[in-house]
Amino acid sequence: MSALTRRQWLQVTAAGTIAGFANPSSRADEKLKDIACRSVHLGYPQATGMAFYNTCRPITSAPGTYFCVCGWDAGYYGIQELGNGNKLALFSIWDSEKNDPNAAPAEERVKTEHVDPRVRVKRFGGEGSGGQSFFPLKWSLNETYRFIVSMTHKDGRAFYTNWLFEPDTKAWTKLVTFSVPSKRTELRGLYSFVEDFQRDRASAALTRRAQFGPAAVQSADGAWHSLRQAKFTGDSNPVMNIDSQIVDERFELATGGTITNEHNPLNRVMTLPAATATAVPADLPDSL
């Protein structure tokens, strides 16, 4: 992604949304220019809780695109279009700052506590290390997809679960539960982003655009609360063919190609209309 790994960038960005840290987009890295589309993010200020609900409507995509829908300081969950055109849902949890997936001691690694039989699970490295899962999902442009990440904490371990509202069954499916040694007791530093991971120069000329939300977070008492604000940020790639705006009461992110920064500058906080405060869906799972 840059001199810093995706994990480092997102942790700094997440920290900035909850603690007022400086945004990393102020440190330009000319080496990224014209290699890939600039990664752009939405940070949901002050949002913490036991579950994070969000939606994604992909508008324009290209091979090598990741639309992260539910990200937080320990992992991320969203949809990918691979270089070969295959599409899937990706859910990842970090367990180490080390890039070698075999470097962390076995007792410190992510464990798989539950897995849907259609899901493939493996370890990853190169941006820190941890566990990740892949669910085949033939998502389409201009359709809305719904996601939840939930967590619990017990005996020194954090348990993270990803949920998908499957388009075919019209029901929520529990896909994977990962656990990892952790002192975390809630999801913090919530974010979404759009990323070009193809990074082959040609990919920088292709547009990627998606709309997110309205999102919601579940507090410890089980109540859901709408997330009406999001801060627009970017990584250290200095190019400015990026943009963000509110469209149809959703936050939109766009990057690459002929995009121009005409709606909101970096680091601006956008606010959805007050009506979205009552937009938390009634059909979210009772038990997460």
Image: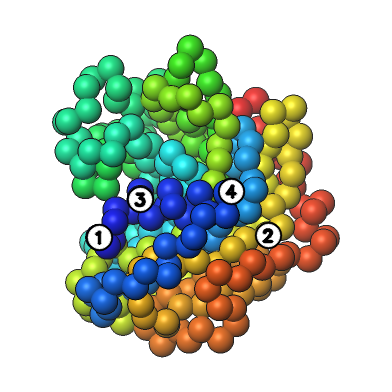
Q: Earlier in the sequence, mark 3 or mark 2?
A: 3
Q: Residues within 10 Å of mark 3 (few under 14, many from 20)?
A: some
Which of the pair 120/97 is nearer the observer?
97
What amino acid is at disc 4? Ile
The label on residue 3 is 1
Residue matched to label 3: 8
Instruction: Tell me residue 130's x, y (percent).
Output: 30, 35
Q: Earlier in the sequence, mark 2 or mark 4?
A: 4
Which of the pair 158/259 is nearer the observer?
158
Say which residue appears at 33% left-offset and 32% top-offset: 95
Residue matched to label 4: 18
Q: Disc 2 on helix, strand or loop?
A: strand
Residue matched to label 2: 229
Q: Earlier in the sequence, mark 1 or mark 3?
A: 1
Q: CA distance from mark 4 to mark 3?
A: 16 Å
- Tell us which disc is closer to us: 2 or 1: 1
